[in-house]
Every structure is written in structure tokens, then in C-alpha cells.
Amino acid sequence: MKTNNQNQVMLLVHAAMIAALYVVLTFIANALGLASSAIQIRFSEALTILPYFTPAAIPGLFIGCLLSNVMTGCALPDIIFGSLATLIGAVFTRKLRRYKWLAPIPPILSNAVIVPFVLLYAYGIKPLWFSFVTVTAGEIISCGVLGMILLFSLQKYANRIFTVQ
């Protein structure tokens, strides 16, 4: 039986690993040119389903997104509000964990609502309606398709990987 301190350490380790994975996957998508086109496909966004399995994913995703945005040279509003969009999505994914098929919906919605405004005000990308369409499409691919593939792949091993609930 693990003590409370051991559980806290494991949650911290899980959060750090998720943050590191997020950063690495963001850099891979950037290197492949998938994160800079009209429809951005960030492999790291597939990780946004992880709060379904563990609360450690909430800070892990937030810190991972924050670090990724800083390290890839994003504008300050993108660093702040893009990371907050990921945090909001992670929190609500955790709250909806009883409904597996809803896991990708919160990050899709939070990014679809927040990121187009970031693109407009931080980078001057117009028209706004087009950003709503392209960001939503990219999030559906990243979170909805890739995220659900990841969720079903991890589900079989979740008790071994995410030992602390």
C-alpha cells in the first residue's frame, strides 16, 4: 500500500512526464510543418484526453503547453491564453471522465473558442470566422481522432500506467 506522500510523488512524476511529452510532440509537429499551416495538427493535443485517466494530466498539460509556447517563440497572448485554453479543456475532460466519448470535447471547444481570438489579436490573422473553422478542424483531428485512438490504446494498460487515481 502506498502512502499519501508516495501518491503525491507519483502524481508529480506523471505530471512532469506528460508535460515533457507535450513539449516533445509539439516540437515534432513543428519540425514536420504541421503546426504552422491553416489547419494545425499538433500531436501534443492528442494528450488532452489524459485527464480521463489521471488528475496529474491537468497540470502536466498546462505546463507542457506553456513551455511549448514559450520555447517555440509564440507571442505573449498565445503563451497565456493558449495555455489557459489547454488548462480549461483538461479540467473539464477530468470532470466528464464518466463519459469516455466526451473526453475530447472540452479541449476541442476551449481551443475553438479561445485560439481564434489569440490568432487575431496576437498575430493579426484574419478573418476571424476562418480561424474558428480551421482551429476547430485541427482540434477535431488532434483531440478527437488522435486523442480517441490514444484513449482506446491506453485503456487496456491504464491500471499499470496510471497507478494513482
Image (cartoon, rainbow, N blue to C red):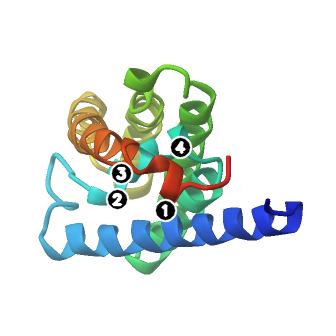
Between residue 138 and residue 147, name the one nearer to us: 147
Quadrant housing residue 35 = bottom left
Query: CB under 8 Å between callouts 3 and 4?
Result: no
Q: Secondary structure at mark 1?
A: helix
Per the image, the residue denoted by label 3 is 45
For the N terminus, the image quarter is: bottom right
Real-space Cα distance between discs 1 and 3?
9 Å
Q: Earlier in the sequence, mark 1 or mark 4?
A: 4
Figure check: 109 above or below 165: above
Q: Amino acid at mark 1?
A: Cys
Query: CB under 8 Å between callouts 2 and 1?
Result: yes
Relative to 108, is 153 on the left or the right?
left
Q: Secondary structure at mark 2?
A: helix
Q: Secondary structure at mark 3?
A: helix
Rendered image: mark on residue 53: 4
| Residue 113 locus on image (x, y percent) | 44, 31
Q: Earlier in the sequence, mark 3 or mark 4?
A: 3
Real-space Cα distance between discs 2 and 1?
9 Å
